[in-house]
Image (cartoon, helix red, strand yellow):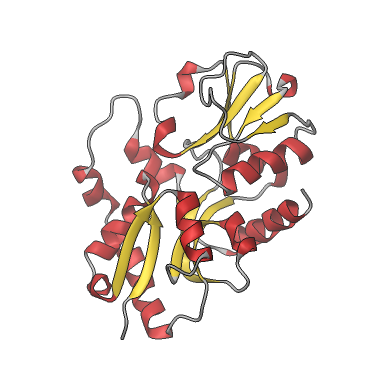
């Protein structure tokens, strides 16, 4: 059998999944690459991989797609790694800088700005002063490990998973294991087992990660992230995709 080509996000939130793959026999059946979320999605769109742990918003760019795992990158409340950082209250924001590394989080910000906060700031991609805007009324979206320890640096910080929960009452799915073609059921079963192994061994994984003084990795991987793709998360995913289509 040809190896299944897989692209996974390279952030800390994926480490339990990678640990499971690396410690399971399925590692011999895959060709694994680690990428930024947007690149991970683009590889799946371009058919350079068969499965990607991609930002869910990117699924709308695939002619055919299906979720191939019972696990995801999700949260049921604050996730502590997907934010809008601002020097002013969200209702006073005039410009929002989007994160070049993300699709789902940018779209989540757009959905919340339009439907929850009901404001229409100018949206900037690839801002020259991204993440350090001089203008008081400019905020920015940022995700992943770059946000660790940054909450104390800005007077107004909005955790987008928490704001989504306030808006909808539902958890949120940032990324899911999505295929652009049919995947053999036997492989999917072994793949799921490997991912579960990683989640079940997060304590061992944490011992391998560098200690950070500015961020609680244990709380993040054990509590803030919610990896099981349950029915509520599937409902949330469908709702989110519907909101994106209406943007």
Expressed as whole percent of the image width and height from the top left, the position of residue 157 reads: 57, 25
Q: Does residue 10 appear to the left or right of 118 in the view shown?
A: left
Rendered-image quadrant of the N terminus? bottom left
Which residue shows up at 30% across the image and 64% down it? 197
Residue at left offset 23%, top offset 41%: 209
Residue 126 in sight here: yes
The residue at 59%/50% (across/down) is: 172
Q: Which is nearer the eye, 69 or 131? A: 131
The spot of residue 62 in percent (x, y) is: 60, 67
Q: Position of residue 97 (x, y in %)?
A: 61, 30
Q: Position of residue 105 (x, y in %)?
A: 58, 43
**Quadrant in the picture for residue 59:** bottom right
Q: Quadrant of residue 12?
A: top left
Q: Nearer the viewer, residue 150 or 193?
A: 150
221 above or below 245? above
Quarter of the view holding residue 92: top right
The correct choice, above or below, for 28 with respect to 184 in the image is above
- Nearest to the observer: residue 191 or residue 202: 191
């Amino acid at each position: 059998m040809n190896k299944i080509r897989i692209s996974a996000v390279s952030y800390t939130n994926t480490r339990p999944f990678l640990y499971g793959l690396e410690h399971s026999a399925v590692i011999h059946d895959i060709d694994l690459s680690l990428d930024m979320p947007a690149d991970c999605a683009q590889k799946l769109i371009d058919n350079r991989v068969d499965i990607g742990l991609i930002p869910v918003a990117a699924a709308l760019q695939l002619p055919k797609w299906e979720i191939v795992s019972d696990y995801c990158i999700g949260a049921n409340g604050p996730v502590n790694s997907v934010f809008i950082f601002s020097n002013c209250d969200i209702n006073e924001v005039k410009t929002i800088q989007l994160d070049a590394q993300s699709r789902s989080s940018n779209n989540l910000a757009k959905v919340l700005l339009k439907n929850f906060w009901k404001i229409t700031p100018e949206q900037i991609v690839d801002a020259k002063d991204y993440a350090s805007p001089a203008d008081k009324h400019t905020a920015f979206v940022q995700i992943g490990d770059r946000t660790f320890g940054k909450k104390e640096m800005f007077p107004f910080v909005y955790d987008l998973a928490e704001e989504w929960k306030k808006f909808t009452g539902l958890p949120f799915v940032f990324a899911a294991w999505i295929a652009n073609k049919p995947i053999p059921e036997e492989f999917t079963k072994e793949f799921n087992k490997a991912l579960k192994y990683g989640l079940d061994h997060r304590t061992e994984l944490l011992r391998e990660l560098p200690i950070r003084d500015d961020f609680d990795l244990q709380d993040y991987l054990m509590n803030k992230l919610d990896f099981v793709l349950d029915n509520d998360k599937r409902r949330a995913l469908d709702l989110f995709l519907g909101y994106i289509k209406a943007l």
